[in-house]
Amino acid sequence: MHEIQNNWQRIESIVKWANMSTNYFARYIGLARAENLYQIKRGNNGISRKLAERIVQHFPQIDLLWLLTGRGQMFVEESGERGAQIPFYAVDVEKSIRGIDSLSASGYVVLPEGCEADYALYYNGREMGSLLPPGTLVFLSEADTETIIPGGLYVVVTPKMAILRRLHGGPDAATVRMAASAADGFDDMVLKKRDIVKIYRVRYHLIAD
């Protein structure tokens, strides 16, 4: 088993692979200056979500999950036989899932062997409280209303909205109850199954540091 590289070691590995200086690498990915990278080198900062996005958008060969956590392999193609390559979109799931087919992936995330998902997007809402804080990366698989797991996390798409909630049985078999997890301020909603255009199960999630 390989030792997990620290934040700077992962950045340094990419910089060396790209055959760039640190300053040129910073400019190449759109940073005004390299100070952010040097703060990581000094141990003052970690690799933020926005920085990781910048890097995988310019270098789609880099595995986002490895960049954020150090787990797995540096390159997506190296990990192809080890797990599924999931397209990652640097957008909010509730705002963008309805148009997902028209979007271009920002990069790829390699999940461990045996794990499956169709898409990875960010959840930026506050309704799910500490369970899914804003900035959480959620991994979705398309599902249907007949296979809903009570209490499971789902993204529900209707003609009027897309919303992430815990789903429970409704007052009758033709409805579902959508519940938030935040302490207060968000009421449950009851939705008719016939109004659901698409539904995605949240298979996994990664809370950003």
Image: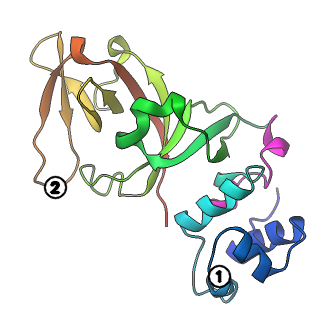
**Left or right, residue 22 beside residue 41:** right
Residue at x-position 37% and y-position 23%: 199
- Callout 2: few (<14), some (14-19), or many (20+) C-alpha neighbours within 10 Å? few
**Left or right, residue 184 beside residue 149:** left
Question: Residue 61, relative to residue 34: is it above or below?
Answer: above
> Which amino acid, mark 2?
Ala
Quarter of the view holding residue 176: top left
Residue at x-position 71% and y-position 57%: 58
Residue at x-position 75% and y-position 54%: 62
Q: CA distance from mark 1 to mark 2?
A: 35 Å
- Callout 1: few (<14), some (14-19), or many (20+) C-alpha neighbours within 10 Å? some
Q: Position of residue 174 (x, y in %)?
A: 17, 10
Magenta-colored stretch includes residue 77? yes
> Which amino acid, mark 1?
Ile
Badge 2 element: loop
What number is the disc on residue 40? 1
Quarter of the view holding residue 27: bottom right
Q: Nearer the viewer, residue 103 or 124?
A: 103
Q: Position of residue 128 (x, y in %)?
A: 27, 49
In the rendered image, which residue does mark 2 sit on? 183
- Magenta range: 65-81
Question: Residue 118, relative to residue 64: is it above or below?
Answer: above
First in sequence: mark 1 vs mark 2: 1
Observer-side mark, 1 or 2, equals 1
Q: Position of residue 204 (x, y in %)?
A: 49, 41
What number is the disc on residue 156? none
